[in-house]
Image: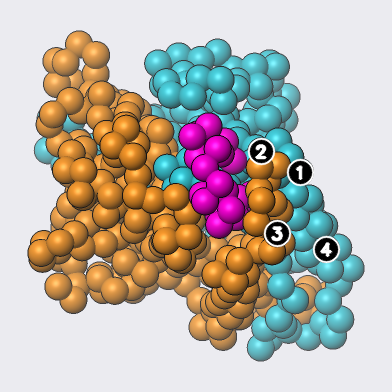
Chain colours: A orange, B cyan
Amino acid sequence: MATYTPDERSKGVRLAKRTEYDADLIHGIINATPILHVSFNAPSKEDDGAAPQFPTILPMLGAIGTYGSEQDPHIYLHGSSVARLSRLTGNSELPLCICATILDGYVLALAPFHNSCNYRSAICFGHAHLATDPAEIDFALHLITNNSIPARWENSRQPPTNAELTSTGVLKVRIETASAKTRAGGPSDERADLRDPEVVGKTWVGVVPAYMVLGEPVAGEENRVKQVPEYLSDWVADVNSLNEQKAIDAVDG
Amino acid sequence: MATYTPDERSKGVRLAKRTEYDADLIHGIINATPILHVSFNAPSKEDDGAAPQFPTILPMLGAIGTYGSEQDPHIYLHGSSVARLSRLTGNSELPLCICATILDGYVLALAPFHNSCNYRSAICFGHAHLATDPAEIDFALHLITNNSIPARWENSRQPPTNAELTSTGVLKVRIETASAKTRAGGPSDERADLRDPEVVGKTWVGVVPAYMVLGEPVAGEENRVKQVPEYLSDWVADVNSLNEQKAIDAVDG
């Protein structure tokens, strides 16, 4: 699977030229985004099938991976909210929309109307169900943990207890369609403004890169490991240099 | 209005103790979040009132403010997607869910099951309509611009042209209910793990602060202002110190 097939859900309506369906691009954005935004319609209490007017959004942790001998990658979502979602959906599947957005910079134009952002964003649509196989839950927790913090799984207490495996809510989402939108580069201004010496003479234009950094790890009260382990200091250094580089690269488009 | 009244949409289902309804807290999170996630149900094309299964999420720019002599603050949303939303909704109001999430840090526990994040998150529900009054659109653009980049409005080409005002899509959202969830502090581990010398002896626990920084402004090709103006270098410095401080403050809970 090199690209997703667009449908009514994922097709680029505006800015079609910025819409892409490449699976690697989409998966990369999902896995690089610390917090995913997950939207769904809570089934109405009367269970009359009526349209719920308001969808809900939950911020959740998640990552994309392929379990065992399966062919397709799935998004695994984890968090205390999974319990709520699974109560809502019971044993049936829940239609989800998952969005990941990374801000790469502020684009400042001569006129505020032309200000913009550099960003990478992905949206996935698919049905979700609660994972119940303990081996797959173990896989998903491992995946989500190490996707955020490489090698953390191996360097903390594992395997999970049976109580942890059975009480951890993991949603498995089949990606039915997906797309990505990205924007890079400097401002694009009106010719009239560019030709106005007063406007051009007083208005700084360009890009201010924006990116997430990790600070110095702060040991907890119960910590007994004197030095911050190398896999953690490497993670901090890698995230900081990679995120900065992505934001700088986006300046030139 | 000091607090929002919770209803079925905004009530804390899980982690009720982390759910708050304070208006200042909620507005502060919305205005401090660079990109808002906006979810809605696209009316089905057949217009048969059937429930659309899949909501959509769009990343958008927006800010909260109170226009003219109005009593209540509204969320104003801006972006090329507004055109799509307003085409979908026509002249009627569109039910929206708006979510803002700020990551403050990774919380590393002895067992991956107890890993967590420090974060501030707000969710607002309400009906949206397209702003049509040019004076209010001007107000909204000013608000959104300066909420991201203080004093940028005054320091770029304004007022907007009539063409800009009439072609800019601005959605005005009445906040009908809203809530915030926040998490701060260090890890919270199982007693059994804390008493296991092998686990405690090899597993670093604590918090790794995370926050967005702004890099050095990079002048665009068309820029003719030699020095980065003070209001921009102040903005970069202020964002960087404030965001770092918030992430550090969250470590201690």
Q: Which residue is drawn at 70% across and 42% down?
A: A221
Q: Are marks 3 and 2 in contact (CB under 8 Å)?
A: no
User: Residue beneath label 4, please?
Assistant: B237
Determine which quarter of the picture holds residue A18.
Answer: bottom left
Instruction: Tell me the tag on residue B203.
Output: none
Which corner quadrant of the image does residue A128 belong to? top left
Vertical placement of residue A6 versus A219, above or below: below
Crowding at mark 2 (Cα within 10 Å: few <14, some 14-19, many 20+): some
Q: Is residue B196 left or right of residue B219?
A: left
Range shown magenta: B187-208
Q: Which of marks 2 and 4 is in front?
A: 2
Q: The numbered mark 4 sits on a residue in which chain?
A: B
Of all chains, the one bearing label 3 is A
* Mark closer to the chain start, 1 or 2: 2
Quarter of the image with the N terminus of chain A is bottom left
Task: Tell which subunit mark 2 falls on.
Answer: B
Crowding at mark 4 (Cα within 10 Å: few <14, some 14-19, many 20+):
some
Residue tagged 1:
B249
Amino acid carrying label 1: it is: Asp
Q: Residue at x 34, y 49 (%)?
A: A159
